[in-house]
Amino acid sequence: EVQLVQSGAEVKKPGESLKISCEASGYSFINYWIGWVRQMPGKGLEWMVIIYPGDSDTRYNPSFQGQVTISADKSISTAYLQWNSLKASDTAMYYCARHGSSSVRSYFNSWGQGTLVTVSS
Amino acid sequence: QSVLTQPPSASETPGQRVTISCSGSSSNIGSNYVHWYQHLPGTAPKLLIYRNNQRPSGVPDRFSGSKSGTSASLAISGLRSEDEADYYCAAWDDSLSGGVFGTGTKVTVL
């Protein structure tokens, strides 16, 4: 069974850095694209970024390019999403999700439980 | 701002059929598969339909998807109270070289 377990909720101040994680199990981590989806309070889902752990190829939503960094550690089957300088507007729920096939154009068929990030002074 | 447009809300009485539209363009729906997700408050989104009209194992056949040109739709027949949720379409966008979600539709069972 595919499982994606995300790190816990975070409360940060503007300007601080943050790295949240998504530990995968139940499948070959290097063979499927895995990525992050944002949901701001009261808003819809936003596709942020995906990575192919096998070769670290990435695809970013232009709106998030330069704002966040995705990475993956094959040795521990874990994907990460990182901010260098958080803003209040980064306050949101972040879901990690895995593609249903090895295609970059695929759909997300497995989801983590979500990580709530709150940025407030 | 999303490039896939959905109506903000839809409602119907139990047992009836509701249809949700998703309008895109040639760079997304027009040239790629459409997928649909159900999102209940406080839970992770769930894949409902993939590749335009395929249902994952465990999804009731009350849910069906279709696509024509640069638009797609999700139909829910035999509406039940547990179908109250937010529904999102999604597709790959060749111009963005990334995925896009629709604006989302809140379904209410009256």
Image (cartoon, coloured by chain):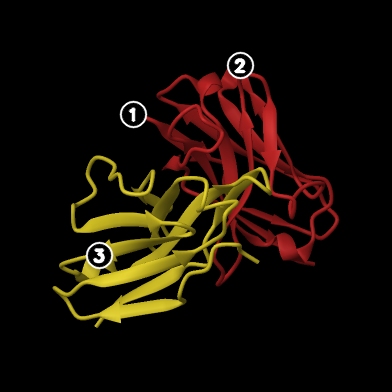
Image coordinates of residue A44 in percent, x first then y, are: 54, 65
- Of residues B59 and A2, which is closer to you in this image? B59
Question: Which residue is pictured at 57% across the width and 59% down the height?
Answer: B25
Residue located beneath label 1 in the image: A1
Q: Nearer the viewer, mark 2 or mark 3?
A: 3
- Of residues B55 and A120, which is closer to you in this image? B55
Type of amino acid under label 3: Ile
Image coordinates of residue B65 in percent, x first then y, are: 31, 55
Residue that extends furthest to the top in the rendered view of this protein: A75
Residues beneath discs 2 and 3 located on the same chain? no
Position of B82 compared to A36: left or right?
Answer: left
Q: Mark 2: few, some, or many residues within 10 Å (few <14, many ≥20)?
A: few
Residue located beneath label 2 in the image: A75
Question: What's the chain of the residue with tag 2?
Answer: A
Q: Nearer the viewer, mark 1 or mark 3?
A: 3
Colour assignment, chain A: red
Figure quadrant of residue B67? bottom left
Image coordinates of residue B94 in percent, x first then y, are: 63, 45
Residue located beneath label 3 in the image: B76
Type of amino acid under label 1: Glu
Residues beneath discs 1 and 3 located on the same chain? no
Colour assignment, chain B: yellow
